[in-house]
Image: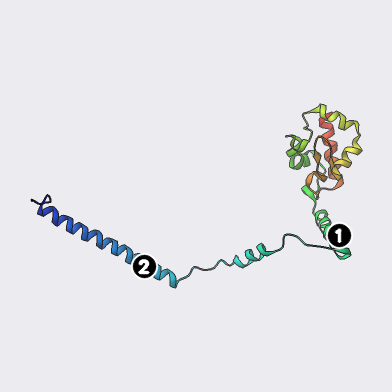
Amino acid sequence: MTNPVSKTDAVFLKHFVQLITFLVCLCIALIALGAYIYSHHPAEENPAKARVTDQRLLPVGGVYAGDTGRAAIAAAEAAAKSAATAEVAYGGTTDGKTIFGNLCHACHETGAGGAPMLTDKPHWASRLAQGEETLVKHAIEGYTGTAGMMPAKGGNPALSDEQVKATVDWMITQVK
């Protein structure tokens, strides 16, 4: 029987296998060297890691019971209210158009949450019939009706009652 591979091809294949074997061994050696070097030089730890871990471990809420709990809840509510009233929304402006453009337009231009849109005058007729005082009261204290809900002060507790009243007045002039 004759050998189907010529002598030249056999030499080439022998050298090619030797080259591939050498390259595979070199690759394994480089991977091992890299792993050795990396194991002796660990990465720096993030300095914020401890703070982030502490924040994750904080309780979600507190448990208050009895008179002590009621006092703690009342104190927290008072602190939140005083913090909200300490800042003045929109630089203290009483320009209803400015406040509407910054806060109220999100619902009263899209109808979100069942809010009557300024362009939809028929929906305002029943509200206007209740009187301006009622509209201002609902805007300040919040209101939940059958058609939707109005968050207190439009969801911004930093608004003063005068700012809410000015905005309601401006909105009333727009829908009349």
Q: Position of residue 47 (x, y in %)?
A: 58, 67
- State the residue in front, 28 or 55: 28
156 is higher (above) or lower (below) than 70 = above
141 vs 21: above or below = above
Q: Secondary structure at mark 1?
A: helix
Circle 1/circle 2 CB separation < 8 Å: no
Q: Earlier in the sequence, mark 1 or mark 2?
A: 2
Amino acid at circle 2: Ala
Where is residue 66? Give x, y as percent.
87, 63
Q: Residue furthest top?
A: 122
- Identify residue for label 1: 74
Q: Relative to 69, does residue 157 appear above or below in the rendering?
A: above
Distance CA(mark 1)–CA(mark 2): 64 Å
Name the mark on residue 32. 2
> For the point 82% across and 39% down, which residue is it?
167
Q: Specify the label residue 35 is tagged with.
A: none
Q: Horizontal and vertical percent for residue 176? A: 84, 28
Image location (x, y in percent) of residue 99 = 78, 42
Quarter of the view holding residue 119? top right
Residue at the far bottom in the pictured view: 40
For the residue pair 110 and 167, the one nearer the viewer reads as 110
- Side of 33 where 143 appears, left or right: right
Q: Residues within 10 Å of mark 2 (few under 14, many from 20)?
A: few
Few, some or many residues within 10 Å of mark 1 (<14, 14–19, 20+): few
Inspect the image, locate mark 1, and give the three-letter code of the amino acid beneath it.
Answer: Ala
Give the residue drawn at x 84%, y 48%: 160
Q: Nearer the viewer, residue 75 or 174?
A: 75
Q: Residue at x 82, y 63 (%)?
A: 64
